[in-house]
Image (tube, rainbow, N blue to C red):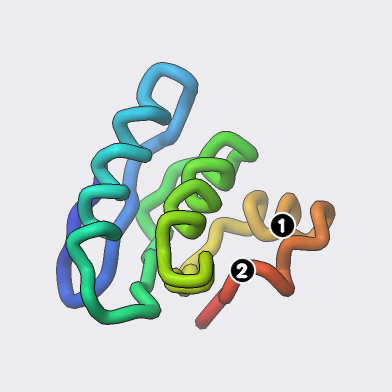
Amino acid sequence: MIVFKDQELQVSGKIDYANAQDYYLDGLRVVQSQTKFPLVVNLAGLESGSTLALAVLVRWLRQTPQAQGLQFKAVPAKMMNIIQACHLQDDLQIIQ
């Protein structure tokens, strides 16, 4: 589920092959409606930090100014391991 609350795009639930496109489109609507960047993406409610979930986040990132308009908060440990294994930590803004 995607909710825009407290100036954050909050992602919860599980992103899988059956719903990844819906997550992408719901999040894209929020990203495209923003005028102030960077936008914080809070992943605290995300059930699984899969490569598919990461792909959805990267697709959102590509739709922001200079592809740098998102900051990721509360990144699940598994997703953080994927980010580090792919050497994406310099491309993604991870905040605490």
Query: Toward which corner of the image does residue 94 lie, by quadrant?
Result: bottom right
Position of residue 10 in the picture relative to residue 82 (left or right)? left
Return the residue found at the far top.
18
* Residue 85 image offset from top left, x and y in percent: 83, 54
Tag of residue 92: 2
Q: Residue at x 52, y 65 (%)?
A: 67
Task: Using the image, determine if residue 80 lies above or below residue 70.
Answer: above
At label 2, counting other C-alpha atoms closer than 10 Å, the crowd grade (few under 14, some 14-19, many 20 or more) is some
Q: Residue at x 39, y 79 (%)?
A: 38
Disc 2 residue type (three-letter) = Leu
Q: Secondary structure at mark 2?
A: loop
Relative depth, front residue between 67 and 3: 67
Relative depth, front residue between 18 and 90: 90
Tag of residue 37: none
* Residue 19 image offset from top left, x and y in percent: 36, 25
At label 1, counting other C-alpha atoms closer than 10 Å, the crowd grade (few under 14, some 14-19, many 20 or more) is some
Q: Secondary structure at mark 1?
A: helix
Q: Residue at x 42, y 56 (%)?
A: 63
Task: Using the image, determine if residue 79 lies above or below residue 40.
Answer: above
In terms of sequence position, does the residue under pointer 1 or pointer 2 come before the other? 1
Numbered circles on residues, count: 2
Q: Residue at x 63, y 52 (%)?
A: 79
Query: Mark 1 near mark 2, Cβ–Cβ under 8 Å?
Result: yes
Relative depth, front residue between 37 and 79: 37
Judged by depth in the image, the label closer to the viewer, 1 or 2, is 2
Position of residue 76 in the picture relative to residue 31 (left or right)? right
Label 1 sits on residue: 83
* Residue 13 image offset from top left, x and y in percent: 34, 40
Task: Using the image, determine if residue 86 lies above or below residue 88.
Answer: above
* Residue 95 image offset from top left, x and y in percent: 52, 80
Disc 1 residue type (three-letter) = Ile
